[in-house]
């Protein structure tokens, strides 16, 4: 009883120990913030990139893609754990947006009615998904998960305005109302948050046209055919996409798979050989096949089975080597980025951990001073019958109390900082003109602001143990003191 | 350590008896001072009976406090033996000695030695807090508090329960120290120059307290002092001279 009583007294009355309390608080908060941001970044990275690509990707290494993809898809669909396999295209292009913006972009071709089964693209759309979700929330009747899933299934490249509006905008173009829709990454259209951190209204973008130019690459021929003008076509903006991944949002446009395939000369067609005057069938090609697994299944096992299918089709159809194909899990396809972030997280954790060792030494010094200062008190307590172990227990308990209170306060401060980190970052930018979190470097436009309970628990336990560690030697010294020497100490 | 064995009883009266409860034989204690060795106790012998008030008189530096510390198992002799109720205290374990200091012995020091962060009541309860576990103390708290308040009241300190030592006079602090020493109803009270840091009048009052404890409660007291007048108030006076104890001249 006396140990607890004295620990609580010393905690309240010995102000010098508050310095070690502050040290534990600051170190705990600092490590929590760093690990939360870095860990959150890694989690966002994993979730977002996983959300872009599906679980397993059959990837054509070259821009010319690979043929017989539909056969691969049909065979992949026979694998028991497969939810869906969808072909996608990816290439480079140039866009002219309403004669206002001209830039290079990554052009992605999706079968938009199917792509929601393999990745999270539909939930990145503003007009067709997010605005409706927000509207429902504002009205006090938020959408259920089932309703959200239904919304995602309905997304399309369909033109939202009446045909006469399109004819009025591009009267010089023949049948402009029959052109395809395009979804642009939010950065392509220059859409940014306003000063209050809100995304602006953008229905006015729906009457913008985009002239897209792409470069078809034929693997059977060397180089690009420049004898004919590169294919280009007019598209209407039907929506914008915000995946949260900077590189995708700044430079990606999405068009119907079939339209892009045709523009790239990757669709199935017949070609007449001028020398032999025979018609040969050219197989349709795709760049990737994205495959999603049913929940709870091992994606590495799925990868293995998809690889078997791909190898079989390559063998059966004698697909030439100039159509290199790899099969990867989504993690493998992003391995370079993920590994870099994991290493950065580990390095930062170690560095801040080393800084926290300073707190241990600070506690040691302060507690050593307290034990010296309390020498006479230690003699008094022993003269009244406290054992050596009991006296040691006072100072160990005191150290642990510092650790517990310091870790608790550190958790509070850390939580407040992490929870409000984007606001703090914005204030820092307004006050100092410095933007530390650069989306171009960190791939996301918002700083991660969630804490992982497991990581938090580990950090708090380490903080408490560190405080205890700092108190061990002083406690041992207190225990070893001879009561008479302690009572006589001046 | 869950229940108090006895009802809180200030009298704690134990009749004087011929039984020797504390015996020291051939005690020798030396201290190293740099390169030289100082022999403080050469061959001190002492026996104390239940209910006796023994005063040990000697000049400053004669080893009185050292002898008291050895008798109260705060220190160990280099040679010799100390027995209490037949138990060899020199061979006793550290934990055993701690328990003895807490439950059987009480100490009053010249400089009071109160804990500055604790108030009067808490300082008095300190020995009880050490004796009982957290659960034991919590469950016996009302009884223990009542005993502490009664002890403090008998020493004229009931109006100062919430005061801290730096808010008390010397005499008041010594009263609190006595209260702390009496809290667990010790069988032997060791007083090391209890009036050494007090003025004459206050010292007289403190001696009055000790005398009253001895006379009314039969408290066994071993007191060391350099003041012959004070020593004469005890039942028996011994003189520590040249490291040995002798009977005082009457």
Image (cartoon, rainbow, N blue to C red):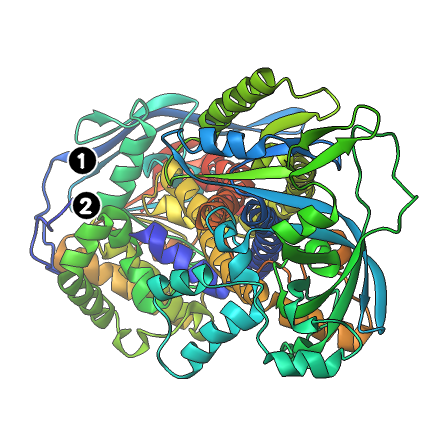
Q: Secondary structure at mark 1?
A: strand
Q: Is residue A203 left or right of residue B160?
A: right
Residue A194, compared with residue A322, is above or below; it is below
List the single residue furthest toward the front.
Answer: A277
Q: Which residue is mark 1?
A: B21
Cα–Cα gap, marks 2 and 1: 9 Å
Instruction: Indicate the position of residue A110 as horizontal and vertical percent values.
Output: 59, 51
Q: Which residue is mark 2?
A: B187
> Looking at the rendering, which quadrant does residue A357 occupy?
top right
Residue B44, labelled with which disc?
A: none
Q: Residue at x 45, y 25 (%)?
A: A301
Q: Are discs 2 and 1 located on one and the same chain?
A: yes
Residue toward you, A421 or B186: A421
Residue B190, compared with residue A132, is above or below; it is above
Q: Residue at x 56, y 72 (%)?
A: A127
Q: Is there CB contact under 8 Å for labels 2 and 1? A: yes
Instruction: Indicate the position of residue A155 as horizontal and vertical percent values.
Output: 50, 63
Subunit under mark 2: B
Q: Is residue B44 at least partly visible in the picture?
A: yes
Instruction: Indicate the position of residue A78 as horizontal and vertical percent values.
Output: 39, 30
Q: Is residue A168 left or right of residue B83?
A: right
Residue toward you, B165 or A104: A104
Residue A425, compared with residue A356, is above or below; it is below
Mark 2 crowd level (few <14, some 14–19, many ≥20, 10 Å Cα): many
Subunit under mark 1: B
Name the N-terminal-most of marks 2 and 1: 1
Q: Closer to us: mark 2 or mark 1?
A: 2
Mark 1 crowd level (few <14, some 14–19, many ≥20, 10 Å Cα): many
Residue toward you, B117 or A193: A193
């Amino acid at each position: 009883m006396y140990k607890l009583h004295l620990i609580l007294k010393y905690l309240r009355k010995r102000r010098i120990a508050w310095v070690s309390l502050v040290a534990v608080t600051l170190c705990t908060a600092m490590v929590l913030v760093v690990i939360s941001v870095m860990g959150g970044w890694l989690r966002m990275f994993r979730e977002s990139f996983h959300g872009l690509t599906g679980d397993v990707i059959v990837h054509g290494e070259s821009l010319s893609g690979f043929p017989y993809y539909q056969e691969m898809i049909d065979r992949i669909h026979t694998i028991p754990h497969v939810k869906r396999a969808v072909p996608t295209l990816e290439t480079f292009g140039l866009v002219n947006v309403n004669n206002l913006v001209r830039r290079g972009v990554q052009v992605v071709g999706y079968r938009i009615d199917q792509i929601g089964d393999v990745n999270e693209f539909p939930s990145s759309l503003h007009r067709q998904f997010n605005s409706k979700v927000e509207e429902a929330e504002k009205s006090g009747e938020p959408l259920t998960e089932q309703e959200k899933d239904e919304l995602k299934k309905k997304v399309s490249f369909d033109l939202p305005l009446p045909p006469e509006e399109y004819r009025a905008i591009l009267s010089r173009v023949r049948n402009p109302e029959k052109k395809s829709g395009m979804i642009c990454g939010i950065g392509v259209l220059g859409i940014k948050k306003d000063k209050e951190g809100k995304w602006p209204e953008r229905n006015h973008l729906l009457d913008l046209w985009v002239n897209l130019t792409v470069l078809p690459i034929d693997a059977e021929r060397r180089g690009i055919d420049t004898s004919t003008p590169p294919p280009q076509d007019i598209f209407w903006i039907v929506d914008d996409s915000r995946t949260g991944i900077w590189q995708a949002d700044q430079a990606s446009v999405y068009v119907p798979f079939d339209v892009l395939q045709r523009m790239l000369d990757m669709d199935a067609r017949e070609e007449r050989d001028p020398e032999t005057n025979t018609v040969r069938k050219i197989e349709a090609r795709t760049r990737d096949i994205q495959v999603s697994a049913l929940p709870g299944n091992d994606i590495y096992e799925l990868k293995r089975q998809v690889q078997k299918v791909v190898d079989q089709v390559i063998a059966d159809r004698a697909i030439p080597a100039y159509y290199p194909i790899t099969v990867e899990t989504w993690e493998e396809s992003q391995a370079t980025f993920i590994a870099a972030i994991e290493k950065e997280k580990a390095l930062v954790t170690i560095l801040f951990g080393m800084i926290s060792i300073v707190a241990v030494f600070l506690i040691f010094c302060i507690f050593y001073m307290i034990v010296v200062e309390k020498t006479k008190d230690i003699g008094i307590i022993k003269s009244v019958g406290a054992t050596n172990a009991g006296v040691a227990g006072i100072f160990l308990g005191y150290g642990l109390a510092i650790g517990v209170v310091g870790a608790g306060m550190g958790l509070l401060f850390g939580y407040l900082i992490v929870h409000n980190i984007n606001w703090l970052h914005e204030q820092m930018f307004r006050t100092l003109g410095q933007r530390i979190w650069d989306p171009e470097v960190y791939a996301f436009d918002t700083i991660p602001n969630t804490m992982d309970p497991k990581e938090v628990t580990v950090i708090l336990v380490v903080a408490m143990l560190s405080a205890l560690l700092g108190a061990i030697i002083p406690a041992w010294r207190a225990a070893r003191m001879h009561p008479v020497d302690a009572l006589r100490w001046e | 350590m869950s229940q108090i064995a006895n009802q809180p009883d200030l009298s704690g009266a134990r009749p004087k008896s011929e039984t020797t409860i504390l015996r020291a034989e051939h005690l020798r204690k030396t201290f190293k001072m740099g390169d030289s060795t100082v022999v403080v106790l050469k061959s001190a012998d002492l026996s104390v009976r239940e209910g006796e008030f023994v005063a040990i008189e000697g000049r400053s530096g004669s080893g009185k406090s050292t002898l008291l510390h050895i008798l109260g198992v705060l220190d160990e002799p280099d040679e010799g033996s100390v027995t209490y109720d037949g138990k060899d205290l020199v061979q006793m374990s550290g934990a055993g000695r701690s328990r003895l200091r807490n439950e059987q012995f009480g100490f009053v020091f010249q400089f009071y030695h109160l804990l500055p962060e604790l108030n009067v009541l808490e300082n008095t309860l300190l020995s009880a807090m050490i004796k009982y576990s957290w659960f034991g103390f919590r469950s016996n708290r009302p009884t223990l508090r009542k005993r502490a308040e009664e002890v403090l009241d008998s020493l004229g300190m009931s109006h100062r329960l919430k005061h801290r030592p730096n808010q008390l006079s010397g005499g008041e602090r010594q009263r609190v120290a006595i209260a702390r020493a009496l809290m667990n109803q010790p069988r032997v009270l060791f007083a090391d120059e209890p009036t050494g840091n007090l003025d004459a009048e206050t010292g007289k009052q403190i001696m009055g307290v000790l005398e009253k404890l001895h006379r009314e409660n039969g408290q066994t007291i071993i007191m060391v002092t350099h003041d012959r007048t004070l020593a004469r108030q005890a039942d028996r006076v011994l003189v520590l001279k040249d490291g040995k104890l002798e009977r005082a001249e009457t």
